Image (cartoon, rainbow, N blue to C red):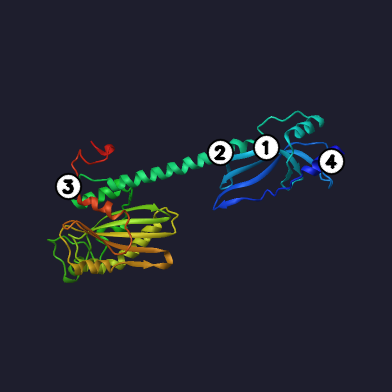
Amino acid sequence: MKKIILFTLLMLMVNSNSVYAAGLLSFGGEQVVEVINLPNDERYQLATGESVDIGYIYKSVEVIFIPIWNYDGYLVGKVGDKGEYINIPFDDLNSIIIESGHEFPEGPYLDFWHRIGGKIVFLLIFFFWGFKLVKKYQKKQKSNAYISALPTGRERLQDILINGQQFNVQQLAELEPSILEAEKGLDVEADTEVDPVTEAKSSTQVEGLEFLGFRDYWGSLVTVSILNMNKVSVEQVELNNDELFERLLAVAKSIPSKALSTVHYVYYTFDKSPSDEDIKRLKSLKKRKIKSGTNQIPCIIDFENKTVNLAQPFGALPSTKTLGNSFIRADKTQGLPAEDKT
């Protein structure tokens, strides 16, 4: 009876759901776990008839439901299974434990997950994502800093795309220059006699497509093509644009990728600066096929004026800064990343 009165006088019910949360971070919520299961008799019951056990109450900090820190822990009288408890002075708590035939419990009172396991998982996730971010940053920095030592701007551009941006080179027959033409015709040698119709057809062939690369980038398949505008006219490019777009659609289907959308960057490269009118005409070749989530984006690269002119308000891939590195010819042993020096 004495113990019943003691418990009744000391009873302080606390709700364990007072948790402060911000996003996926929670802290301040109290939790109670059982430490000693007391005999289920009137000595260890409240006046209301509820049984009391020895429990441990604590507060914790959790990130994405992973416990990373515990604090303010102490032994209490645990009431039921709803997180309720009563505070008991230490001397009375010790007497109750001895009277029940148990020894005073030594910590730790929490399981491995709440003590250490959660911290290990959190640290592993933290370091994993930290490592990924660092590698991504380093890769971006290297890509932006990559400078090729090749002699011409067009060669440097291709070198930067392949080695600085890790585009996979794809050699596809359907994108060979001799197939891109306004009218179907035959390749004809300059000194071969042909009828006027055949000669007219062959004169429309676009021979400037020199490079195609692809890579997955943030859930999209990205391809890059380089057109050498020393070999073709703006008129030829305009005539072949629909044909080129259809062939790029076929390329996307032939490349193993789970990407849901595709972006085709077509770089029109000039050794001699194009006119403002030519730039306007090339930029107007931008195409979009909504159903297949496909975009074709023209990009005019002027090696004479050292400018990059993109047919959209937002950035290119690679960045205009990286593309601009094709204007810089590095010394073969100076200015290159250490692993690329020979």
Instruction: Assess whether mark 3 and mark 1 are in contact (beta carbons under 8 angstroms).
Output: no
Residue 137, above or below 192? above
Report which residue position mark 2 lands on.
Answer: 119
Mark 1 and mark 4: span between their CA atoms?
22 Å
Tell me if 111 is positioned left or right of 102 in this view.
left
Instruction: Tell me the number on the disc at residue 151.
Output: 3
Residue type beneath disc 1: Tyr
Quarter residue 68 falls in: top right
Q: Position of residue 227 (x, y in %)?
A: 24, 59
Give how far across and how far down residue 331 sits, in percent.
18, 41
The nearer-to-camera label among 2 and 3 is 2
Numbered disc 2: secondary structure: helix
Residue at the spot of label 4: 4
Q: CA distance from mark 1 to mark 3?
A: 74 Å
Mark 3 and mark 4 residues within 8 Å of each other at the beta carbon: no
* Nearer to us in this view, 216 or 125: 125
Of the two numbered discs 1 and 3 on the same chain, state the one appearing first in sequence. Answer: 1
